[in-house]
Amino acid sequence: MFDSWPLALTVTVKALALAALLLAGVGLGYTLRAKGDDRRHPEREDDTDKLTGLSNRNRLMADLAEAVNRPLGRGEALLLVLFDLDGFKPYNEAFGHRTGDALLTRLGAQLERSLPPRGHAYRLGGDEFGVLVECSVAEVDAVIGQALAALSESGDGFKVFASHGSVLLPKEASTVKGALRLADRRMYTEKFNEPGAAGSESRDVLLTALREKQPLMVERAVAVDDLALAVAEQLGMTAEERDEICRAAQLHEVGKMAVPDAILMKPAPLEESEWEFIRRSPLVAERIIASAAALVPVARLVRSLGERWDGAGYPDGLAAEQIPPGSRIVAVCVAYVAMVSERPHSVAMRPARAIEELQRGAGSQFDPATVEAFERVAIARGMDAAV
């Protein structure tokens, strides 16, 4: 039945690849010190990033929690900016971890020096940094621009720069979690959609092709993307991992382009021969997505979306921890969105009922920890009470 697929897919692959953080007063937490003060030595050792000497994520969380309810002067705001380095991974691989650590230390020092007197820099882990700055609203763009310049370095065969996401408190967010979530989402959006971002053109081509075949699939992919990012954040995935997970969420339906519309739109249960097309679709998706070299890690995640926690899934029969974490996250989100959506063969479930179904599948179809993380997202968004 599938003997003719390789040739057709080869044509499809080639075509797609071608087309393809303000405080009023004196301080922020333990105080945003003046430039002449020693700002690179926080009061407690566990607030310090040992590599760069900057404050760490714990300190940022504490500073934000103390600062978020402080009154601000007229025309002032608290600026939170999160940064993620682009180009650092290949630099680290090419020049070695010691040289990579030296670059992170150098960029961290430059970032701290670039800030105004009431600003503070943090290393959040890996190649992620953040800043909190008390400044006038009119100064925001300049502060961000100087920080971005500080986090860039280029040389023979390499270029390291930063994507960023910024939030003005309290105008755009009033809570610590809300500010961090919004800044992170904006950073991710810039990183993913900036011109020339690895794989972005191929992704756009694939989504365009999918939209032409089944527009509703793209709408569902947007919903899966949003949920998958939130669950990945709950599980503490790195920025790079979140990026790959979101791409996989956006492209998870690509393999369905090789499934006949009559099967996709069938208003009755599928026969075994028709199910073979569905079970084959992750392999089709992997092949199409991997035609763009930058999307190979994403293709691997999509391949494993049909796997089950108990090992009874497809295409490879992976079980439990053998299944990539990103695939487990996207699979739970795909299942939820499918259940709350109208489909040819079933009516949409209430969100609360769909969450109950995920809970029933935890430990058999789904990773229990991922389902628990999804539940936390659902509770935070009020999905568990939606009717």
Image (cartoon, helix red, strand yellow):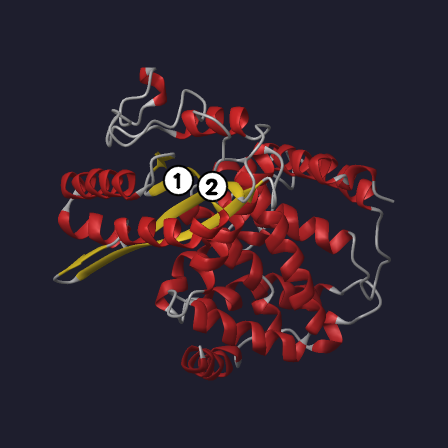
User: In the displayed image of the protein, which residue is found farthest to the top?
Assistant: 44
The amino acid type of the residue labelled 2 equals Leu
Q: Residue at x 51, y 83 (%)?
A: 8
For the residue pair 204 and 82, the one nearer the viewer reads as 82
Pick whichever of labels 1 and 2 is earlier in the sequence: 2
User: Is disc 1 surrounded by few (<14), some (14 to 19) or many (20+) residues within 10 Å?
Assistant: many
Residue 179: image location, x then y, percent? 56, 40
Q: Nearer the viewer, mark 1 or mark 2?
A: 2
Which quadrant, please, contains the N terminus?
Answer: bottom right
Residue 178: image location, x then y, percent? 60, 39
Secondary structure of the residue carrying numbered label 1: strand
For the residue pair 375 and 84, the one nearer the viewer reads as 84
**Residue 114, quarter of picture:** top left
From what the image shows, is residue 51 above or below residue 217?
above
| Residues at marks 1 and 2 touching, judged by CB atoms closer than 8 Å | yes
Point out which mark residue 130 bears.
Answer: 1
Query: Would you say 263 lies left or right of 227 here?
Result: right
The total of numbered circles placed on residues is: 2
User: In the displayed image of the protein, which residue is found farthest to the left?
Assistant: 156
Q: Residue at x 39, y 47 (%)?
A: 83
From what the image shows, is residue 50 above or below residue 323?
above
User: Is disc 2 surrounded by few (<14), some (14 to 19) or many (20+) residues within 10 Å?
Assistant: many
Q: Residue at x 47, y 45 (%)?
A: 136
Point out which mark residue 80 bears.
Answer: 2
**Residue 154, quarter of picture:** bottom left
Which quadrant, please, contains the C terminus?
Answer: top right
Q: Residue at x 58, y 30 (%)?
A: 71
